[in-house]
Image (tube, coloured by chain):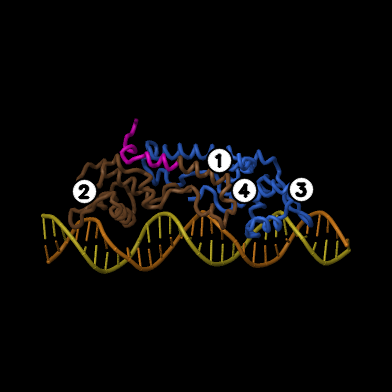
Chain colours: A brown, B blue, C yellow, D orange
DNA sequence: TTGTAAAGATACCATAACAGTATCATTATG
DNA sequence: CATAATGATACTGTTATGGTATCTTTACAA
């Protein structure tokens, strides 16, 4: 199972790298060199982050990407949602057609509990908090 | 994401059905009629449960399956493991080749925490506890 | 003693999600 | 105005999931 897929993962690492780099603008080329990721894929990821307002982009020579907000304000929950949609521990299964006893389904209730816990955790975890090493 | 895949789900429902039926032996045919599941697939699921000691099987006419243990002793964690392998919220991602900073990776630690929580929950949830409705 | 209704074993198949590539257009900058 | 960057989009390979299909084996009951 993957709570976090590859594109979300790349997004997280790229954002961390950008914060640590302390530069005005960071290009895909630089990120690829620093992080050993497949370039075209990472580009697609960053374009998506731009569309969703996490990054700002600058085209043309010396262009690149910049965080649109402080790293304290960028949460894992949001990033996951961007690339994977709403966070769910269980998809499709608990629908009427598949699970006729959905209303009384104890399993569904329990999984919903776990889901809430997971979501709240992910929503309290920011890029900034990932960078506080040794603490 | 699917904490529980279809085969695990079918296994859970079949086991619940068998407990509620109060019969000595329950055949696949009966389960298919009662639960509206694809027969061949369910058969494969039950065969697996038999191999793993969750069910006992009887071949031949009037044959079928019986729980090998009390429903209080059959846990979701175990069922998931049978069909999906060890429970993981995150696979493959946190390996050296992909995540060079694995030792200090804060994200990994946080996800490991969530994983432990989830596993402990699933391991405290038995077939019997799913059947205690209204409580 | 034999037909039949069950499970056992295995091989095969369709679909969708994931991970990634390839290409061409657009836009700043020097 | 060449070039180095992003924007947009279409395509592709692989794998996991969710099944089918088929043949074998076994036991009961008439």
Q: Nearer the viewer, residue B133 or A120?
A: B133
Mark 4 to mark 2 CA distance (whole Å): 53 Å
Which secondary structure lies at badge 1? helix
Residue located beneath label 2 in the image: A25
Q: Which residues are magenta?
A: A118-135
Q: Nearer the viewer, mark 4 or mark 2?
A: 4
Residue B122: mark in rendering: 1
Determine if marks 3 and 1 fall on one subunit. yes
- Left or right: A10 as drawn, with respect to A92: left
Asked whether the residues under the numbered discs 4 and 2 touch, taking CB atoms below 8 Å apart as contact, a structural biologist would say no
| Mark 4 or 3, nearer chain start | 4
- Left or right: D10 as drawn, with respect to B22: left
| Mark 4 or 1, nearer chain start | 4
Q: Residues within 10 Å of mark 3 (few under 14, many from 20)?
A: few
Q: Nearer the viewer, mark 2 or mark 3?
A: 3
Q: Residues within 10 Å of mark 2 (few under 14, many from 20)?
A: some
Q: Quadrant of the C terminus of chain B?
A: top right
Mark 2 to mark 1 CA distance (whole Å): 46 Å
Mark 4 to mark 1 CA distance (whole Å): 13 Å
Residue A6 place in picture, x, y as percent = 39, 51
Tell me: residue A124, above or below residue C4.
Answer: above
Q: Residue furthest front?
A: B134
Residue located beneath label 4 in the image: B12
């Amino acid at each position: 199972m993957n709570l976090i897929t590859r594109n979300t993962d790349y997004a997280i690492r790229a954002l961390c790298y950008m914060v640590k780099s302390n530069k005005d603008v960071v290009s895909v080329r630089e990120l690829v060199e620093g992080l050993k990721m497949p370039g075209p894929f990472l580009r697609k990821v960053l374009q998506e982050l731009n569309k969703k307002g996490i990054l700002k982009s600058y085209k043309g020579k010396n262009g690149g990407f910049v965080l649109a907000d402080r790293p304290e304000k960028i949460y894992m929950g949001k990033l996951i949602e961007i690339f994977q949609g709403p966070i769910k521990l269980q998809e499709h299964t608990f629908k009427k057609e598949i699970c006729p006893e959905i209303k009384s389904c104890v399993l569904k209730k329990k999984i919903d509990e776990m889901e809430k816990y997971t979501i709240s955790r992910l929503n309290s975890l920011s890029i900034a908090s990932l960078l506080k090493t040794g603490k």
